[in-house]
Image (cartoon, rainbow, N blue to C red):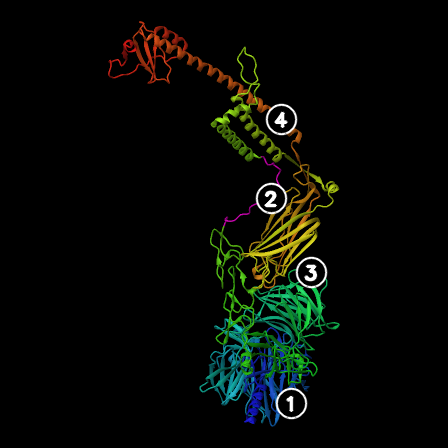
Amino acid sequence: MKYLVLLLILMMLTYLSQAKYSRDIQKSGIGPENRMAASMAINPFNLDLYIFGGINEVYYNDLWVFSLSSRKWKILYPFSETPGKINLDPRMNPAGLVRNTTQEFCIYGGRSYSKVYTDLWCYDIKKFKWKLISTYNSPPVIKHIAFTYYNYENQDFLAIAGSDIFSFDLKFYMYFIIRLDFRSKFWQEFNLDFTFYNGEFEADGIKVPKITIHYYESAIYIHVFSEAKELQKIFMYNLETKTIIISSYSASLRCDFELKYIFSTVFNDTLYSFYNPSTVLGMNLFNYSDISKSNIENFNIMYPALCAYENKIFSFGGRLYINSLKTKKVINSIFEIEFLENDKFALTTISENYLSPQTRFAHSMHLIKGNFYLFGGKSQKTYYNDLWDYNPITDIWKQISAPGDSPSPRAFFASDSEGDAMIIWGGEGSDGLKNDMFLYNAFKNTWSKIIPQTSLVPSKRKAACIALMLPYAYIIGGFDSYGICNDVWKFNFGNNTYEKLSFVYESAFLHCFAHDSDIYIIGGDDFKEFALDTNKRILKVMAVETLNLGNIIQDIFINLDPYYIRIGGRDITTDSLKNFIDFTFPENEYLSNIDDYPSASAYIFYNTSVYYHGGNYYTTQVTPFLDLPRPKFAKIDLFELCQDIGCTMACAKGFYYKSNSCHLCPPGTYNDLINSTKCWSCDPGYYNPSQGASSQKQCYPCPEGSFNSEFNGKLCKICPQGYSCPTGSREPIIIGSFSIKNAVIQPVMYKGNYPSQIIFIVQIGGGLITAIVLIFTISFHKLRRLIPVLDMYSNLHFTEDGSFLQIRKNFIGGFFTIIFVGICSIAVISVMSIFFLDNVVESKSLIPLVILEEEVPKFYTNFEMEINLKNYGDYCEKQMMSLEISNEVTCSNNVLFYTVNVKRSQNSISCRMEGTTCKINYKCKNCEINAESYVKIDLQQRQSYATEISINVTSDSSIPESRSSVLSILNPDKGYIFIGPVPNEFYFSMTPSLFRSSVYSFPSLLTGYHVDTGALPQIGSQNLIENMALSTGVSIKIVLQKVASGLYTERSAKQSGILLASSLFGTVTGLMSFVGGIMSQSESVLTKKKKKMIIKHNLKNVIKKEAEISSMYFGVQEYYVPRKNCFRVKPSSDNTPIILSIGESEKIELSYFDRTILQNEIPMESDVIPFNNPKNSENGFHERNMSENML
């Protein structure tokens, strides 16, 4: 049992060691570039098709072999001179054949744009060598060549036929046969005796005839094709009898265009000649009148390379016509045309047309939104700068023509990509090493060159590595003209500057990648693993135990976090290629093998597979050819490999894991992580129309005039009429719904603080208190007796004329004394309030600064700036950990702040996000502004951009409790956003101010600045949304221009304390006199009224006494008069006494004498109102004789 287990383990290890995880994307592999007019021949021993030369946009001289048994392409590189090296040019339409006896592939002749060749070359299939065959009696330069290769009597022969190029130019055609004996290397000519002058047929529009030549059963047949039936001939040269038989035939060969090619073969005694796209003419070689004409369905190809074997014809390349010859394209397909009965043909595709980049190595390939972008590289001595796009879903390559400033042809360059941006740096070209940098924007399909703004740059080099950590790129190692480099450079895309950071071990062909805040550096010609901390700029050696794989370079490296994979490469110590695949985990390492030896290949990780293209050519593992490219495009499925070794399958960026497989992120989402289970949504205001996005930068802000209010936005909606939608809008904004308020705030002239409210309160309160005191003292008898004691006007009391002046105190004087005290208190408090609260006057003036500096040499102030970036693309506020608590909102590490010529004792900067607006607040304490002072802010985050920038500068004025503030707003051009390294400049004038005060309530000799708008703000870097691929950062420069004049402000008192005292004294004395005068007048009126009351009272007593006496003797007539009314007594003709009733109870009897007196002394009414007694007489008067009663 033990041995059985060991046997099973050994079998498993043997299986794994022989695992074939590498698979060609195309089943047949990568074949020749698409071309036409190539040469093709078949090796009947192994059924290999050999293809040489041809033309597309250029002429070719490469040699390929396609195995009909394995259906695989393979390129054959020579280790010798190549046809065309001596004669300068590659060629098209050469004669091609495989010599059966020597197993050589030979070509003869052909032509290029400027030459027709007559040389003979043979390629030794076993030794991989071309050699030029020297021959004798070489044929002339032939136009319209036809050839056939045959073996006769155990000798190899090449027979060609055609027209002398010199006679062709004279429109005189003399066709002949020339045969080469490979053994003797001697050309033998046979005259066909077939000559004509084409001018005879020009009137009929006859084209130049074409010929084919074919060997069949010891005879050579030459078939002449022509529209003119007079020229339709068959020549048969009998090799045994050495005789020529000329026969005529008749066939309709009229064409709409010139015969472009002719090919013939013999099958079942019939000579089949192929001409035009798909026409086949069959002629029985034993009966020339037996002619058939047929077509090959779906074979509309011009200029293919053709060869025959048994009952099949093989076709390679050519120009394929589609849709009735209206559309055409050059292809590299291989078709098999099989002869059937009744002149029918079966067309089969045995190698699909596959357009792909030229074979190369030392190039790059990057994954952008699910597509592969391949650039540059080298093939032998040819450098490339072409750009290709591969869609893995449709398996279609497409060459990209991108406008702009593109890189020169190069190889061994450093490259990396993020989002839609692909960076190309340095490398090697035909003109030497390079250190330039280029950006390809896949979203806009444009190239641009990045010009550094620093003189200190990395040396020109190749084989360096570059890692993007936007907005930075890190360039490490490589080869320069002095040898291996060991430096690390940091390039800042925010301001296009280089910075030299550190040193690593000397190495080239490193792998470097960004992870969190570190740049990992792995591999190289002396394998090590380092990590560069980009924050601390410290290079750390990673403690990783790896298997001893040798000094491997140019391998495939895939970071799958937390492990990485290395595949293949070249061991520089043994100069041999490797076929290992190494999984390096944090805890262990696993090593396996694949069935390929990739080296110097371009590669990417897509879905669960590693795709690689090209690389170094090799014949065996230990025989790599470093200048020869390998036609290879394959993938290694890691899912299959992980099933064997038990690792966790990883999904590439742009994919998410679900249901045991990886899926592309749908439009409107992205995933920038390896092996994620979900895709992240694009925020409102952004959109992503493509699937497979692998970066947040592929979520584009909605263009101006559109908006998106939802997550996972695929497209943006058009802004409705009457609304405004700036770039990156989440919701439409009603036009006119927002406005700028308080754009400029400046200190105003001092207006004082007139205490109107205090005065009002004092007046109302003082009046109420005085009234309350009076009412209270009058209401109580004891207090009322004290009022005279308060009398301050004892010398101002009323005195009748003729009476002595008496100083006395009385009630009236005390009463008015209380009133005086109340009024005086109100007046004094009011005057004091005005003095202390509104006793300041201010004056301002502009004075040359040199004069002010004599009093105050330095002007210090506190000022602050609020910078608002509207629709900011990133998050400028520093992200806090969930357990981290901070009262101060700090800025992200990539928000950089500089001050120039601003002296300060303390400053602070904070950032916060309010919706989509980034608010940056800068505070400077005890700051001095000097000439050419400015503040610069660089936001260098991954998604740094803005649609509007506003700057609010606020400074403390020298005037106490006053500030000066100015708001300036800058908008980009229509359709643009603020993004890029050139700063957007804002200008503010800073006027020094000095404050002086002679009022003790204000400090004196205060300094400050008054802010005002300077020049108009200037737009810096702005760009279209389509150019956001690598454009990053927003730069703001706030220029503080110190003015040469200063503002002098002085405050002083309106009146002094002496003036206050004198005014108070005058007010009190005046009020005292005023109140005393009123008291005196009031007392006079009251005295006179009292006197009248006494007289009235005495009169009443007299009248009452007289009435009592009169009533004793006379009758009494009684009248009623209301007491409250005055009355008037009318004179009477008799002496009848009248009783005057006053009210209801008091009655006065008036005699005639009394009536006469009252009429003179007392004001009376015009009529006497009689007492109305309804029980008495009709006139309503009540009369009665009182004598009896009174008696």
Residue 1187 in percent (x, y) is at: 29, 9
Q: CA distance from mark 4 to mark 2?
A: 44 Å
User: Which is more N-terminal, label 1 or label 3?
Assistant: 1
Label 2 vs label 3: CA separation? 39 Å
Tell which circle, 2 or 1, labels the residue nearer the N-terminal end.
Answer: 1
Report the magenta stretch's main SS.
loop
Q: Secondary structure at mark 1?
A: loop
Residue at image mark 1 = 182
Quickly name the residue at label 2. 745
Whether pointer 3 and pointer 1 mark residues with C-beta atoms closer than 8 Å, the reply is no
Q: Amino acid at mark 4?
A: Phe
| Mark sitting earlier along the chain (4/3) | 3
**Residue 727 image position (x, y, % from top left):** 54, 56
Q: Which residue is mark 4?
A: 1065
Are circles 2 and 3 on residues that touch, CB within 8 Å?
A: no
Residue 1040 is one of the magenta-drawn residues: no
Q: Secondary structure at mark 4?
A: helix
